[in-house]
Image: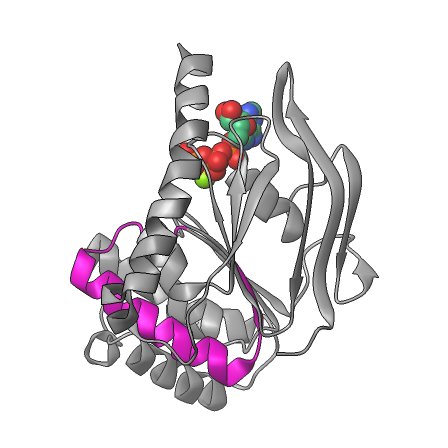
């Protein structure tokens, strides 16, 4: 893994009216590094991800991506949202090809690439279907394929597997690990599942209750390459319970603050 910084944010804050949503929050991520963020609901995870994606500006603090101050969305960053929308009037194949169209890839080439992307997420047989003919989890896999086919150097993913059942979640995690390995890209990944964070990540950042700050950082002591089978190891189980202890404390604070 190279040590070249891909993301570096320093003392980022964000407020919405009277609500202090975030920070000050500092984080970093390297090329080839998989970093997950866990933390209680409403602590500012999605807000932070959108800031690193250039979709929102922080009120204060700085964000650098690939050594450049972030001014807005970058072509090389792929984002998968918490509730990623598909385009209902386009077929599944053309939904995946859409992100390549925006980047000026020729029609036949983008359809070839999109077909391979659909194979990666197990939806090759549904290329000609429309999103309304798919389940919610299948639509989320279309959104994931759409992000991966652009060969990004940075993937920002906000609960991309949240709508999937347990088995599909594990299979998609294995696919994502393989794709990230191949691309050598950096990943910032939000999840509510501690097991998923442990399976996928090199490092896990634990956020506090709102306004979200990083309160702990855990390096995951599992060898790569990994598949979902590592979750049955003792080292993985210990890591899960350690993070759960940290999160439980923050979740209690968040619940008390909300009542
Ligand atoms: N556009 C907005 N306008 C007003 N308030 C907002 C907006 N976006 C987020 N917030 C507020 O900022 C805080 C953080 O929201 P955010 O969506 O980042 O949390 P989260 O950690 O992603 O939560 P979850 O785990 O439930 O997805 C919340 O209190 C939310 O109500
Ligand atoms: Mg969120």
Quadrant in the picture for residue 258: top left
The colour mode here is one colour
Q: Nearer the viewer, residue 242 or 200?
A: 242
110 above or below 16?
A: below
| Residue 236 picture location, percent across and down | 33, 61
| Residue 216 picture location, percent across and down | 56, 43
- In percent of the image, x 48 and y 76: which residue is there? 180
Point out the quarter of the image occupied by ligand 2: top left
Image quarter (top left, top right, bottom left or bottom right) of the C terminus:
top left
Q: Residue furthest top?
A: 259
Whether residue 33 is visible: yes
Left or right, 116 with reference to 212: left
- Magenta span: helix, strand or loop, mainly? helix
47 above or below 256?
A: below
Quadrant in the picture for residue 64: bottom right
177 above or below 42?
A: below
| Residue 123 picture location, percent across and down | 24, 75
| Residue 193 picture location, percent across and down | 33, 49
- In percent of the image, x 44 and y 37: which residue is there? 246
Residue 129 forms part of the magenta stretch: no
> Which residues are drawn in magenta?
159-188
Left or right, 59 with reference to 249: right
Q: Nearer the viewer, residue 54 or 246?
A: 246
- In percent of the image, x 78 and y 52: which residue is there? 71
Q: Nearer the viewer, residue 196 or 217?
A: 217
Whether residue 86 is visible: no
């Amino acid at each position: 893994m190279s040590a070249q910084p891909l993301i570096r944010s320093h003392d980022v804050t964000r407020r919405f009216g009277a609500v202090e949503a975030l920070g000050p929050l500092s984080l970093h991520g390297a090329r080839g590094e998989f970093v997950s963020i866990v933390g209680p609901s409403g602590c500012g995870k999605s807000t932070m991800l959108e800031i690193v994606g250039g979709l929102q500006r922080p009120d204060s603090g700085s964000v650098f991506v690939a050594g450049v101050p972030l001014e807005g969305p970058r072509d090389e960053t792929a984002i998968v949202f918490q509730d990623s929308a598909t385009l209902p009037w386009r077929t599944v194949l053309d939904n995946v090809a859409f992100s390549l169209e925006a980047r000026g890839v020729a029609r036949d080439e983008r359809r070839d690439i999109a077909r391979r992307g659909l194979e990666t997420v197990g939806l090759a047989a549904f290329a000609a279907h429309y999103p309304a003919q798919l389940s919610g989890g299948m639509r989320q896999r279309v959104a994931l394929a759409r992000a991966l086919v652009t060969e990004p150097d940075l993937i920002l993913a906000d609960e991309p597997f949240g709508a999937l059942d347990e088995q599909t979640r594990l299979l998609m995690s294995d696919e994502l690990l393989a794709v990230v390995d191949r691309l050598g890209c950096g990943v910032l990944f939000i999840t509510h599942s501690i097991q998923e964070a442990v399976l996928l990540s090199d490092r896990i950042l634990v956020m506090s209750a709102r306004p979200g700050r990083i309160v702990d950082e855990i390096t995951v002591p599992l060898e790569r390459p990994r598949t979902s089978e590592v979750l049955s190891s003792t080292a993985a189980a210990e890591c899960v319970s350690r993070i759960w202890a940290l999160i439980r404390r923050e979740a209690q604070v968040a619940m008390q603050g909300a009542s």
